[in-house]
């Protein structure tokens, strides 16, 4: 491992020894300003906005080695490494992206973009609206996956990237990758879709709706304009997160992690016979909910769950997914996890079957993993081995990187 | 079909023609008073209480033909027939219980009891506490399945029933039937457990906890004493019901019923790009939640979900379910439904395996039904056929009913 391919954005002041082996090291968020109005699926327009991004690795002279990583509901542009302003904050896909890792930043120039409407640096409902000098709040437009792709494409334009070696993502991130391949086919060489689906099921929408109702009916929500009331609908957001969290874990995984273990039982292991925390799983969920409600914006939660609901590329092709995918020219890698009941393997197979019907290039793997939907974030040897192999194949197609392949682990 | 076996409690004033064929007809709730203190699992005691019950059919001279039907979370003593005070209100298991129905009230004397702590007539958190003259509210004790069984046994005592031909129930009702068979084995000839489980999983508890948090964090909850504030935590209760409802339906069933069908789309079938109702499934869930929040008591919801959490007969036998079931002398019928993901067939099989280990009599059927957990309430030919056959077998063991069997359909 060498230090020559560390993240490009922030390491001028670092000595090589400061950069951890296998990690992209400390990374700084960059903020890109956009002043050209962005037309949205809803018919509305955002006149100007800012996007927070991080990059890792070095863009090669041909600008052919760029990989866009799209994030899911509660993640951000901080894909890998340690955040400069908080060294405890490790990127959400740090186990996958870094020097010598499956998405090898010695080879690839990896970009993370916080989506428009999110709450980790990019313009969103909590941002000040230039026209009013007040937070956007309920006035922030509802966005779609397609809107995000359009905004991300402008980032690529600014960075001089005409065509991505790969656009990738898990869950909602996978939807964005799919949308890239469909709507901007000439700009995507490989499309990597992990633990995703071509559209939400009624049950998926139902869980999102429960989450939204919990937020919207919290009196502290104030119709989305809680910023002006100097408050936050924490209870509702906490319940929303709890219900979401259950869908990220498998039944078996929860059984394994928590079972019916009691949390601080009464004398002799007895129950307390009350509605406080009685079981470990309750304590865990409450903690997750409360933690989330301290850092996540409730309007962003509404916005992102709605973008999930709306995503359905076959909506414009009378429900024919193959027809919807036909414009894509990318090679596809699709990965699902056996115990994922949020976006079960059958949902990925729908995409695979549509691609095969079109005779499009598709690699598909169903990983036998116990961790439910969350498996896409975890370090599983078969999953990561597959990713590594696939990205080595992409690397081999790039000009000017053959000698770098020697440093792969 | 004859009219001679109509519900015993209320039909003196009716002519035979008023009683519907195949139905127990119009039924009146009876209220039983109990003044002997009831000791509870929590160590607390309820000094006096009232239980609402309904009965259908006629108790035979030997008192050998009684069937106790135990109810689940949001049901009641109103098992069959039309409620006298609201003819639209058909009993929740009316398709199963009635003259000529699988649990034939021409043969059996069927009893429904609203559980202590519920909100359909029996003493519960909304009832006036004699000691204070105020509603119980948060002071109402937390109950367990075992407490309910003790209370139900006192009803049996009052009615002169020493031993039930069968104790039966679905879901939480099945847990009560199991508990009867274990704790009062001499009083149960047959134990019928439908769509149930020997204990909740971590995921089951997690969903209950989400529901409870939604209720408890609703500002209108007032620590459980909302009656004094002349309010009701309707938002929280509504969210609780929505999340519960999702777990009652199968993914496929929701896909079939709602899919991604839009509710009143904008012009040209477009989305509204907002957080109002966009999809049918949202409309359905909101309706279910709001309806529920108008008639169900929030403290009862807490109490019953907690009783569900606590149920675990193997807790006293180091997790050994066979050992827990060993005292039972009943014959068992267990039924599960393939698409039930709340209490999946595997949960029923745990009970079956424990019974088989003990060489106890057990009949088990896994019904291939699309309707998830709710299937236990629905009229499925194989399910009801099985029930009919089983209860015919029970009927054949009763003295003095052989001639009545001729009226079976």
Image (tube, coloured by chain):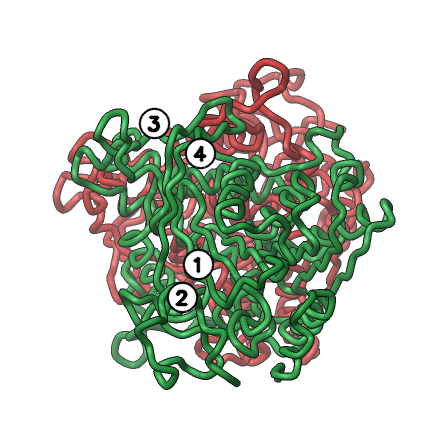
Chain colours: A red, B green
The reply to whether discs 1 and 3 touch (Cβ–Cβ < 8 Å) is no
The reply to whether discs 1 and 2 touch (Cβ–Cβ < 8 Å) is yes
On residue B80, which mark appears?
A: none
Instruction: Say what secondary structure mark 1 lies in.
Output: helix
Q: Are marks 4 and 1 on the same chain?
A: yes
On residue A206, which mark appears?
A: 1
Instruction: Please provide percent x and percent y for residue B31.
Output: 36, 50
Instruction: Please provide percent x and percent y for residue B403.
Output: 66, 79
Q: Nearer the viewer, mark 4 or mark 3?
A: 3
Disc 2 marks which residue?
B281
Q: Are marks 4 and 3 on the same chain?
A: no
Q: Who's the residue at 58% across and 56% down the image?
A: B169
- Residue B119 in view of the camera: yes
Q: Is residue B223 above or below residue B270?
A: above
How far separated are the C-alphas under marks 4 and 3? Answer: 27 Å
Chain containing the residue with disc 4:
A
Instruction: Say what secondary structure mark 3 lies in.
Output: helix
Disc 3 marks which residue?
B139
Disc 4 marks which residue?
A289
Chain containing the residue with disc 1:
A
How far separated are the C-alphas under marks 2 and 4? Answer: 25 Å
Q: Who's the residue at 61% across and 16% down the image?
A: A15
Instruction: Say what secondary structure mark 4 lies in.
Output: helix
Instruction: Please provide percent x and percent y for residue A393.
Output: 77, 55
């Amino acid at each position: 491992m060498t230090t020559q391919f560390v993240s490009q954005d922030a390491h001028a002041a670092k000595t090589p020894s400061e950069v951890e082996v296998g990690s992209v090291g400390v990374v700084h968020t960059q903020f890109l300003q956009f002043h050209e109005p962005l037309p949205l699926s809803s018919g509305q327009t955002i006149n100007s906005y800012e996007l927070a991004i991080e990059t890792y690795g070095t863009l090669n002279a041909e600008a052919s080695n760029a990989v866009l990583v799209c994030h899911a509901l509660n993640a951000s542009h901080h894909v890998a490494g340690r955040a400069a302003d908080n060294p405890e904050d490790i990127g959400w896909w740090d186990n996958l992206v870094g020097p010598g890792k499956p998405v090898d930043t010695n080879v690839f120039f990896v970009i993370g973009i916080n989506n428009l409407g999110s709450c980790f640096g990019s313009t969103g409902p909590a941002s000040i609206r230039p026209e009013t000098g007040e937070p956007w709040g309920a006035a922030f437009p509802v966005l779609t996956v397609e809107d995000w792709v359009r905004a991300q494409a402008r980032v690529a334009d600014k960075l001089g990237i005409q065509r991505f070696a790969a656009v990738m993502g898990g869950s909602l991130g996978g939807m964005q990758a799919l949308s890239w391949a469909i709507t901007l086919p000439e700009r995507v060489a490989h499309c990597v879709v992990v633990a995703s689906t071509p559209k939400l099921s009624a049950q998926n929408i139902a869980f999102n709706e429960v989450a939204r109702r919990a937020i919207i009916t919290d009196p502290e929500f104030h119709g989305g304009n809680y910023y002006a009331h100097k408050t936050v609908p924490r209870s509702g957001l906490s319940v929303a997160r709890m219900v979401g969290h259950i869908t990220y874990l498998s039944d078996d995984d929860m059984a394994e992690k928590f079972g019916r273990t009691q949390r601080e039982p009464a004398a002799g292991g007895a129950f307390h016979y009350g509605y406080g925390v009685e079981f470990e799983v309750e304590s865990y969920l409450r903690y997750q909910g409360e933690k989330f409600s301290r850092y996540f914006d409730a309007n962003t939660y509404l916005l992102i769950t709605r973008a999930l609901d709306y995503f359905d590329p076959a909506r414009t092709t009378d429900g024919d997914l193959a027809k919807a995918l036909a414009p894509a020219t990318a090679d596809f890698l699709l990965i699902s996890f056996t115990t994922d009941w949020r976006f079960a393997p059958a949902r990925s197979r729908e995409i695979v079957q549509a691609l095969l019907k079109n005779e499009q290039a598709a690699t598909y793997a169903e990983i036998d993993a116990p961790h439910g939907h969350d498996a896409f974030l975890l370090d599983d040897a078969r999953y990561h081995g597959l990713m590594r192999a696939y990205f080595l194949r992409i690397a081999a197609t790039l000009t000017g990187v053959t000698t770098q392949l020697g440093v792969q682990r």
